[in-house]
């Protein structure tokens, strides 16, 4: 873990990111075990990373990024995790192929203990195809718990309650 942190820090410094957020994907392969940079950008992570960080640690990444962009000072207390929860996760939702007609069970899933947020990305009429990239997801659940495994179990339970009603899809047309 320390080696990955060092590689990320060195890469960020090398491209000149001196303040503000950075997003770094690191690959650790079996070949030699050395971490390698897969992606580096001057932005927050996607996939609801900031929301997860706030729910679990109490750290407001969005607020910190805005403060950095506006040149406002960052107080050390803003960076200190509050350890609000023992664990947390984002569970992405995948709909079956077809045209979205309705979504059931969202209110019931949101009422479950530990479920802090549910986002649906698509509206009725959207045509779902195969899951090939992040943009093909149907939504996401943010869950917290006493541990990582507890949060995952809560998110999975909520996901099982959400049902996407789809109709047969028509062939996609090229524009």
Image: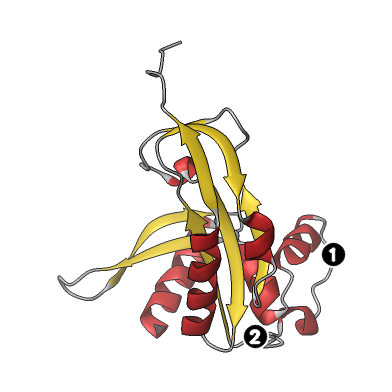
Instruction: Report the front residue among 16 and 31.
Output: 31
Position of residue 112 in the picture relative to residue 168 (left or right): right
Can residue 19 be spotted in the picture?
no
Decide: marks 2, 1 in contact (CB < 8 A)?
no
Q: Residue furthest left?
A: 31
Closer to viewer: mark 2 or mark 1: 2
Going from the N terminus, do you reach mark 2 or mark 1 first? 1
Tell me what residue is drawn at x 66 percent, y 77 percent.
113
Instruction: Report the front residue among 80 and 117.
Output: 117
Q: Which residue is mark 1?
A: 72
Q: Residues within 10 Å of mark 1 (few under 14, many from 20)?
A: few
Tell me what residue is drawn at x 71 percent, y 76 percent.
59
Question: Tag 2, which secondary structure?
Answer: loop
Q: Position of residue 157 (x, y in %)?
A: 51, 70
Q: Label 2, label 1: how many angstroms apart (C-alpha)?
A: 29 Å
Q: Position of residue 76 (x, y in %)?
A: 76, 83
Question: Tag 1, which secondary structure?
Answer: loop
> In which quarter of the view is residue 10 placed?
bottom left
Q: Position of residue 131 (x, y in %)?
A: 37, 43
Q: Please tell me whether residue 95 is drawn above or below residue 105 in the rendered image.
A: above
Can residue 103 be spotted in the picture?
yes
Q: Which residue is mark 2?
A: 85
């Amino acid at each position: 873990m320390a080696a990955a942190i060092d590689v990320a820090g060195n890469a960020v410094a090398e491209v000149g990111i001196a303040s503000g957020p950075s997003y770094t994907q690191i690959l650790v392969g079996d070949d030699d075990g050395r971490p390698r940079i897969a992606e580096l950008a001057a932005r927050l992570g996607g996939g609801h990373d900031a929301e997860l960080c706030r729910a679990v640690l109490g750290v407001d990444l969005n607020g910190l990024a805005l403060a950095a962009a506006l040149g406002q000072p960052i107080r050390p207390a803003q960076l200190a995790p509050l350890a609000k929860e023992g664990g947390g996760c984002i569970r992405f939702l995948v709909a079956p192929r077809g045209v979205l007609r309705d979504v059931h069970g969202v209110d019931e899933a949101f009422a479950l203990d530990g479920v802090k947020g549910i986002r649906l990305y698509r509206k009725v009429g959207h045509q779902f195809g195969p899951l090939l990239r992040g943009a093909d997801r149907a939504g996401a659940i943010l869950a917290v718990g006493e541990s990582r495994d507890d949060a995952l179990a809560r998110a999975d339970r909520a996901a099982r309650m959400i049902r996407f009603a789809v109709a047969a899809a028509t062939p996609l047309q090229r524009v």
